[in-house]
Amino acid sequence: MSTTSYWTPSHLDLLAGSATTTAPVFHPVAVPRILPGHDLWDLWPVQEEDGSTCVIGGHEVWMALSAPSLGHPEERHGRARIRLLARNGDGWTDLGHAFSDGASPGSREWSGSAVRRPDGSVSVFYTAAGQRGEARPTFRQSVAETRLSLIADSARTNGRISLEHESEHREILRSDGSVYLPAEEVTGAPGQIRAFRDPGWFRDPADGREYLLIAASVASGDRFNGAIAPAEARAGAWSLLPPLIVADGVNHELERPHVIVHRSRYYLFFCTQRHTFHPADRAPTGLYGFVAPALAGPYEPLNGSGLVIRNPSRQPDQAYAWLVLPDLRVVSFANYRSGPGMDLRQAEAVRARADFGGTIAPILTLTLSGTSASIVTG
């Protein structure tokens, strides 16, 4: 049974600007695009079962969300598809859509995770947003799984890595409507809707069991009710457990939760945006984290406040969707080139599009020591 830990206003009172937690400035629109004509965001690697990144033929295998670069960048969420990518050094290669058209039980595919099994197949866990065939996109969210074959046979694929698309896509988890609020809104917008998404796969080395960490919303009297929900694999099914972290009254959404084990400690990370805090801009858009002696907790915030990486104050929206790898590399995507007091989410489409990155941001590296975390510089 997990122990619920709370992210509180008193933790945020300890937040202070520091060079060790502030990402270097870069210009999102100047970062080279991997997919010309497409936006790319929310990356994750195909993992081996020990958490390391899957490597085939010298290439790391990755997934990300993608959508055509049309209209306002915020509209990409209504067209999102999962893409397969290969990374070799600093170079990235697009390998096309991970799934065949219409395979998902949703109308869009949102963030998730993937793991290669001992038989060579890949389990992909992702967010099915909306419902297949719906006339207008809704914001219903559930966790789906499919298992695909990873093909790296030169004779069949001309040297390219690919996935076969024949496997069934199954809905495996929905919010229970009791501890976790149902994420079934018909209308809404990113940053305003309830959450039951972003499943992050993890095998606990302490017990060998599989878990998913899910961005959720807890039942409470406050609209700012973000939480991290664990689910455990039991007898071929997934069972929700009590929340690991609750930000009741502090933040509306704790996105892309994931865990790494470093020096026998469990580091739980998530990202969130400045406008989802209560009040808005109470803390910066960034990567936040907690640490515990075991997956079940109890957790305490890193650096006192929970802040691990923040965007610089003069570019408060330059990157988002950070993900920490077991080797402590940190990936994210290039978001908006903006300034203090600006919110390009609300800008006209032409203006927002001109200042949107929509590709992979410069990779950072962390150092972790007990309850402290900092960005490696130099």
Image: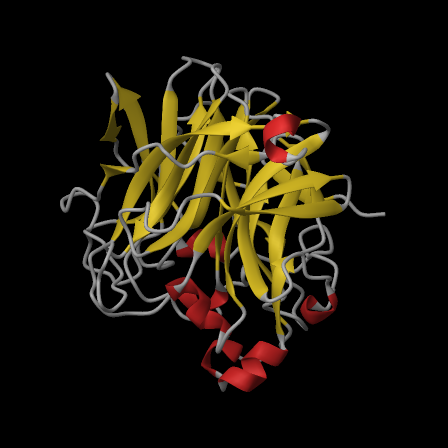
- Is residue 330 rendered to the left or right of residue 292? right
User: Going 72% across and 69% down the picture, which residue do you hit?
Assistant: 27
Where residue 303 sits in the image (x, y, percent)?
Answer: 59, 44
Where residue 100 sits in the image (x, y, percent)?
Answer: 40, 46
- Is residue 71 rendered to the left or right of residue 19? left
Counting every numbered tag in the picture gives: 0
Q: Residue furthest left?
A: 178
User: Going 85% across and 47% down the picture, which residue do you hit?
Assistant: 378
Q: Is residue 304 visible?
A: no
Q: Is residue 352 above or below residue 240?
A: below
Where residue 102 sits in the image (x, y, percent)?
Answer: 32, 50
| Quadrant position of residue 339 | bottom right
Question: Which of the two residues, 282 or 229, is positioned nearer the viewer here?
Answer: 229
The colour scheme is: secondary structure
Question: Which of the two residues, 90 or 330, is positioned nearer the viewer here?
Answer: 90
Question: Which of the two residues, 331 or 23, is positioned nearer the viewer here?
Answer: 331
| Quadrant position of residue 253 | bottom left
Q: Quadrant of the N terminus?
A: top left
Q: Is residue 264 visible?
A: yes
- Is residue 305 rendered to the left or right of residue 168? right
Where residue 324 sits in the image (x, y, percent)?
Answer: 59, 40
- Is residue 109 rendered to the left or right of residue 307? left
User: Going 40% across and 52% down the picture, which residue do you hit?
Assistant: 110
Question: Which of the two residues, 194 or 112, is positioned nearer the viewer here?
Answer: 112
